[in-house]
Amino acid sequence: MKITYPHMGSLNIILKTMFNGIGVEVIDPPPTTNKTLTLGVKNSPEFACLPYKINLGNFIEALEKGADTIIMLGGIGPCRFGYYGQVQKEALIDLGYNFNMIIIDPPHGRLTAFLRELAEYFPQVEVKTAIKSFIFSIKKMIAADKLEKVLLRYRPYEINEGITTKIYEKTIKKLENATTNKEVNTIVSNGIEEIKNNVNTKSKKTIKIALVGEIYMLLEPFTNMNICKTLNELGAEVTKTDYLSDYLINSAFKLPQKIEFKKNAKGYLERDIGGHGLNTVANTVKYAKLGYDGVIHILPFTCTPEIVAQEIIIKVGKDYNIPVMTLIYDENTGSAGYQTRLEAFIDLIERKRMNVS
Amino acid sequence: MVKTVGIPKALLYYNFYPMWKTFFEGVGANVIVSQETNKKIVDDGIKSCVDSACLPVKTYLGHVIDLIEKKVDYIFIPRVVSVEPKKYLCSKFLGLPDFVKSSIDNLQNIIDAEINLYNGEKAFKKEAIKIGNIFTYDNKKILQSYYNALNIQKEFEDIMKRGYTATEAFKILETKKINDKVFTNYDIKIGLLGHSYDIMDNYISMGIVDRLKNMGVKIYTIEMLSEDQIYYGISKLSKDMFWKYERDILGAGLFFLENNYVDGVISVAAFGCGPDSLTEDYLERMYKRKKTIPFMQLTIDEHTGEAGILTRIEAFIDLLKYKKRKVVI
């Protein structure tokens, strides 16, 4: 069995670690490129969202590379992600591929049930090893996310252009090959220290931007055209509101995050509407209250929960007097339009500050 | 003084109007419905919300504005989460009152009750009493209206199952006259898949139902099929669909494909519709594989040019007639 999976942020590191840990061969889908996108778009319904199209592109490329089993998550709605797998499977069958697709439906998003179901597909694997390698992979993910948070906070102040990005990439590579907990900890703390040694935080005024929106768009630099880097280069600190580790941990242990979201979104959106709609509204309110300078909302074209949120956060922006901008991404790859809008947004924030003071 | 409740003639109006009307009148309110969708309504809607929202939602906003202009006391904008156990509706329904409140300033007195049957009927009944209490404190009267409303809804759905569209069924419920003769004269049968709010709204669907009828076509919408027929289609799926109406569309589509119940199938969806993008793709693949029944997709948006849609419908019907040797070329 040669397993493959879709790309989603640092998910591939984790899945690779986990499956290698239990002795299952993994075929990593090639990194998402324009070719992936083209393949996906060609075989997807026009109004499917960008994550669907890129996932499908990942599958096609991985199957070409020799994978024979696809692992995909399912769901019970109301986000359409829950039915991706079923439709993608038919598309791949029509393309003539011979493969096996494992679609795991997490009942109400509980991670334990997910693991139990997953284990059924690998009867030869011992539960203890599986859990051990799973926990280790989660640790890696938390470490990788921690590093990214530091990067997004300090990159605007780097001494030499591009140095922090280089340190980050180098550290992530090391992290990928790490095999023990101790190693992971040292690599990350060294990386963080190195980043901090190469910045001068007094060099500029701080501009703080919160990035909210659909999780796949937040996690995938290819699909969001590396928005975090662009913003950092424009001199803004970025707080990404969703990380894979936060997301998985929250759905695994049912932390009171949802309650916090509901509390924050009260008066604007009264219930979970599927996808990350509630998160978007709640986070916009949260960071507006924290005194951030601006909120940028990103979503894939036709994402219904985010469209509802998009309308609502315009009102939040008015009420809290904070600039809010929505960027919608589709399969067009021209980045100049996004660059210009981000520049204008930062200009606006600087101008707003001048008026106030 | 009798209070008036405005019901927007959009979205789930075509699925639940008789029920809502009966309930509100039962608790002592006057029901006012917004006017038929027209250019002004759609334009008002487009102007008041983000452009990425789908046409049905924009139209809904237009209807709400129409009701505000009519100066009704309350506007009924329910948060319909689920109308059937373990089945959701599209996200836009889950956040509809919040969406409307954000789009239209100073919106007062809206009744934004949550209709949620995901975990059974109990919560629904409670919510009904809460709505009723706006108009009367007589809980007995409210419960009476609640049950009346459910009965009317059942009657309404039964009429549609006999082959009437929602609009025709409204009329039948009002006049209590059923005219079965209308079904005798047709050449071909077509499955018309899509949400009731896309198909039944004559303005946004460019009158597709009437156009087809005038061409001598008998149509079958998802509301006209029995539960068993839908389940038959659903049983062909590897995983049940978690949205109610999309489930019905998929089920009906697969039922038509397996049974030669109709001569052709037209699927209507709004531009950028999230749920329909998946169901349509799935159905199209199945129809292409089997190659027995012609299948056509129509996308509707806020453009008002009818010619494109009309030409495609005509061409499709000609094709079906040709296939049945009713037309000789």
Image (cartoon, coloured by chain):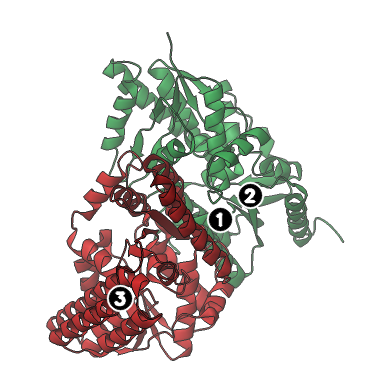
Which label's residue is closer to the chain start, 1 or 2? 1
In the rendered structure, which amino acid carries the disc numbered 3?
A: Val
The quadrant where residue B110 appears: top left
Where does label 3 land, which residue?
A199
Q: Colour of chain B?
A: green
SS state under label 3? loop
Task: Kindly identify which chain the residue marked by label 1 belongs to.
Answer: B
**Residue nearest the viewer, comparing A304 with A186:** A186
Residue A15, above or below A258: below
Within-10-Å neighbours for mark 2: few <14, some 14–19, many 20+: some
Q: Same chain for marks 3 and 1?
A: no
SS state under label 1? loop
Where does label 2 land, which residue?
B301
Within-10-Å neighbours for mark 1: few <14, some 14–19, many 20+: many
Where does label 1 land, which residue?
B272
> Mark 2 to mark 3: distance in Å?
51 Å
According to the colouring, which chain is red? A
The quadrant where residue A29 appears: bottom left
In the rendered structure, which amino acid carries the disc numbered 2?
A: Asp
Q: What x and y, as percent, mark residue B145?
A: 36, 22
Name the side, left or right, on which B279 lies relative to A126.
right
